[in-house]
Image: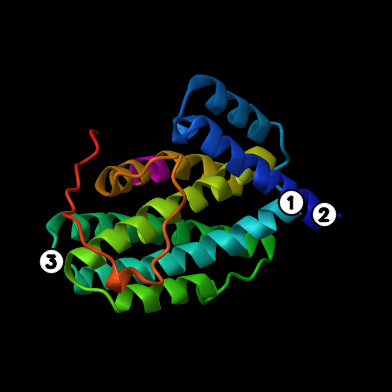
Amino acid sequence: MMKRNLTIITLFIVGLLFTWGFSMLQPHDGFVVAQTNRTNQMNQTSQMNEIDQMFMKEASQAGLGNIMLGELALKKSNNAQVKAFANAEIQEQQQVKSNLMRIAPQTGAALPTTPAPKFQAAMNRLSQLDGEQFDQAYMSEGGVNAHLENAALFQREAAFGQNPDLISLANGGLPIIRQHFNTASAATDYQFAQVSQTFNNQANAPTRQINIRPVPQ
């Protein structure tokens, strides 16, 4: 029953992302106040619920996977802006990893030490590409797709989690996720209406020039 509820919650959040667009994750007074008040009302020693447990596992696995993809981009790409994005992504995920490692002992949770299998599959696909094909595929896979998934993950924790430290981590991460998503979507001409790209046959696909536009601060 709990797994069914979690599936419904996840589908609900993903539906909101695609219906309203990523702008729903931009910080605004109502969202911040609501989450702050909910956190303040909690007992700091409260036990984690299943949403918290899943967040710790999935955020940790996503962090390890995105660090791995970012390090690959630093090795393979010759595009300065792709490298800058990869560096920013690695720093983002290292910070999340550090916070999770700080919180984990307080909860008794054991964090994963390897990324989810889908990241190794993405690593294998991207490793076969070079030049502009690699840049475009990385910005779609490690940029757009990864941050859509992270947005749903962090939003779910912020809305339905129980542990105040994890809720704070999720709320703090959402603006960074939004910024990185904006950078990646600008680079790939991503539109919410289009289906997320896969790269099983990317090596044979025609290339197009990548032109990453920095997101205004």
> Residue drawn 19% across and 42% down?
213
> Is 35 located above or below residue 2 in the figure?
above
Tell me, yes or no, if residue 206 can be seen here. Answer: yes
| Real-space Cα separation, disc 2 to disc 3, in angstroms | 46 Å
Q: Quadrant of the N terminus?
A: bottom right
- Local crowd size for mark 2, using a 10 Å CA cut-off: few (<14), some (14–19), many (≥20): few
Structural crowding at the residue carrying mark 1, measured as other residues with C-alpha within 10 Å and reported as few (<14), some (14–19) or many (≥20) = some
Give the amino acid at mark 3: Asn
* Callout in the foreground (2, 3): 3
Per the rendering, the mark at residue 2 is: 2
**In x, y percent, where is residue 83?**
20, 61
Mark number displayed over residue 196: none
Residue contact at pointers 2 and 3, CB within 8 angstroms: no
Q: Nearer the viewer, residue 162 or 18?
A: 18
Identify the amino acid type marked 2: Met
Q: Are marks 1 and 2 in contact (CB under 8 Å)?
A: yes
Any magenta on residue 128?
no
- The reply to whether residue 48 is visible in this rendering is no
Q: Which mark is residue 6?
A: 1
Q: Quadrant of residue 194?
A: top left
Region of the chain picked out in magenta, as a range: 176-180
Confirm or deny contact between disc 3 and disc 1 (CB under 8 A).
no
Q: Position of residue 90 (x, y in %)?
A: 33, 61
Nearest to N terminus: mark 2 or mark 3: 2
Element under disc 1: helix
Left or right relative to 26: residue 86: left
Q: Secondary structure at mark 2?
A: helix
When the figure is inspected, residue 130 is found, relative to residue 173, above or below; the finding is below
The amino acid pointed to by label 1 is Leu
Q: What is the number of the mark on residue 78?
A: 3
* Distance of label 3 from label 1 (alpha carbons): 41 Å
On the rendered image, what quadrant is the C terminus found in?
top left
